[in-house]
Image (tube, rainbow, N blue to C red):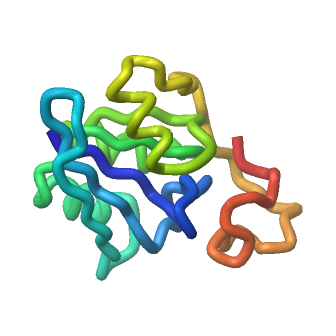
Amino acid sequence: MRIAIPFFEGMIFQHFGHAKHFKIYEVENRQVLMELIVEPEESGHQAVAELLKSLDVRAVICGNIGEDAMRALNDAGILFYGGVTGHADDAISDLIKGALAYDPDIRCTQHDDCDCGGDCSSCAGDCGHCG
């Protein structure tokens, strides 16, 4: 099974829609067999969901995620675990162990007051206005 995590400098990137990198893990028999980093060529929730689907990703572990991204992942048949923070590798390990702490009700809201102006690539998603 392939699982993707939007990430920045090893950490789970906290704004799915602005992730510039995804780390993809091939997991079988509770072991990580392979790791691959991909950079989406196109932006947008639908384009990212289609890319992940083309790479046979079956699940996404992420921080904050909005309704459009959820819909795109659902349409692509990709499960998602939102509201996760910390190191990407730790999240995969926790998922494999059945101990991943996630929030099934996570919803990213607009962050109009944020100094990043909605572009979380400038603040690594830590603006505090998502969630």
Q: Residue furthest top?
A: 98
Say if 53 sits above or below 122 in the image: above
- The one nearer the camera, 127 or 108, is 127
Q: Quadrant of residue 50?
A: bottom left
Q: Quadrant of residue 43?
A: bottom left
Q: What residue is drawn where x is 49% and y is 66%?
A: 19
Q: Which quarter shows the C terminus?
A: top right
Q: What residue is drawn where x is 36% and y is 41%?
A: 71
Q: What residue is drawn where x is 22% and y is 28%?
A: 30
Q: Is residue 17 left or right of residue 40?
A: right
Say if 28 sits above or below 10 in the image: above
- All told, the count of numbered labels is 0
Q: Residue furthest bottom?
A: 41
- The one nearer the camera, 123 or 30, is 30
- The one nearer the camera, 37 or 110, is 37
Q: Which quarter shows the N terminus?
A: top left
Say if 95 sits above or below 32 in the image: above
Tell me residue 113's x, y (percent): 88, 62
Q: Is residue 127 left or right of residue 30?
A: right
Tell me residue 75's x, y (percent): 23, 41
Q: Is residue 28 left or right of residue 67?
A: left
- The one nearer the camera, 84 or 72, is 84
Tell me residue 18's x, y (percent): 53, 67
Q: What residue is drawn where x is 59% and y is 35%?
A: 83
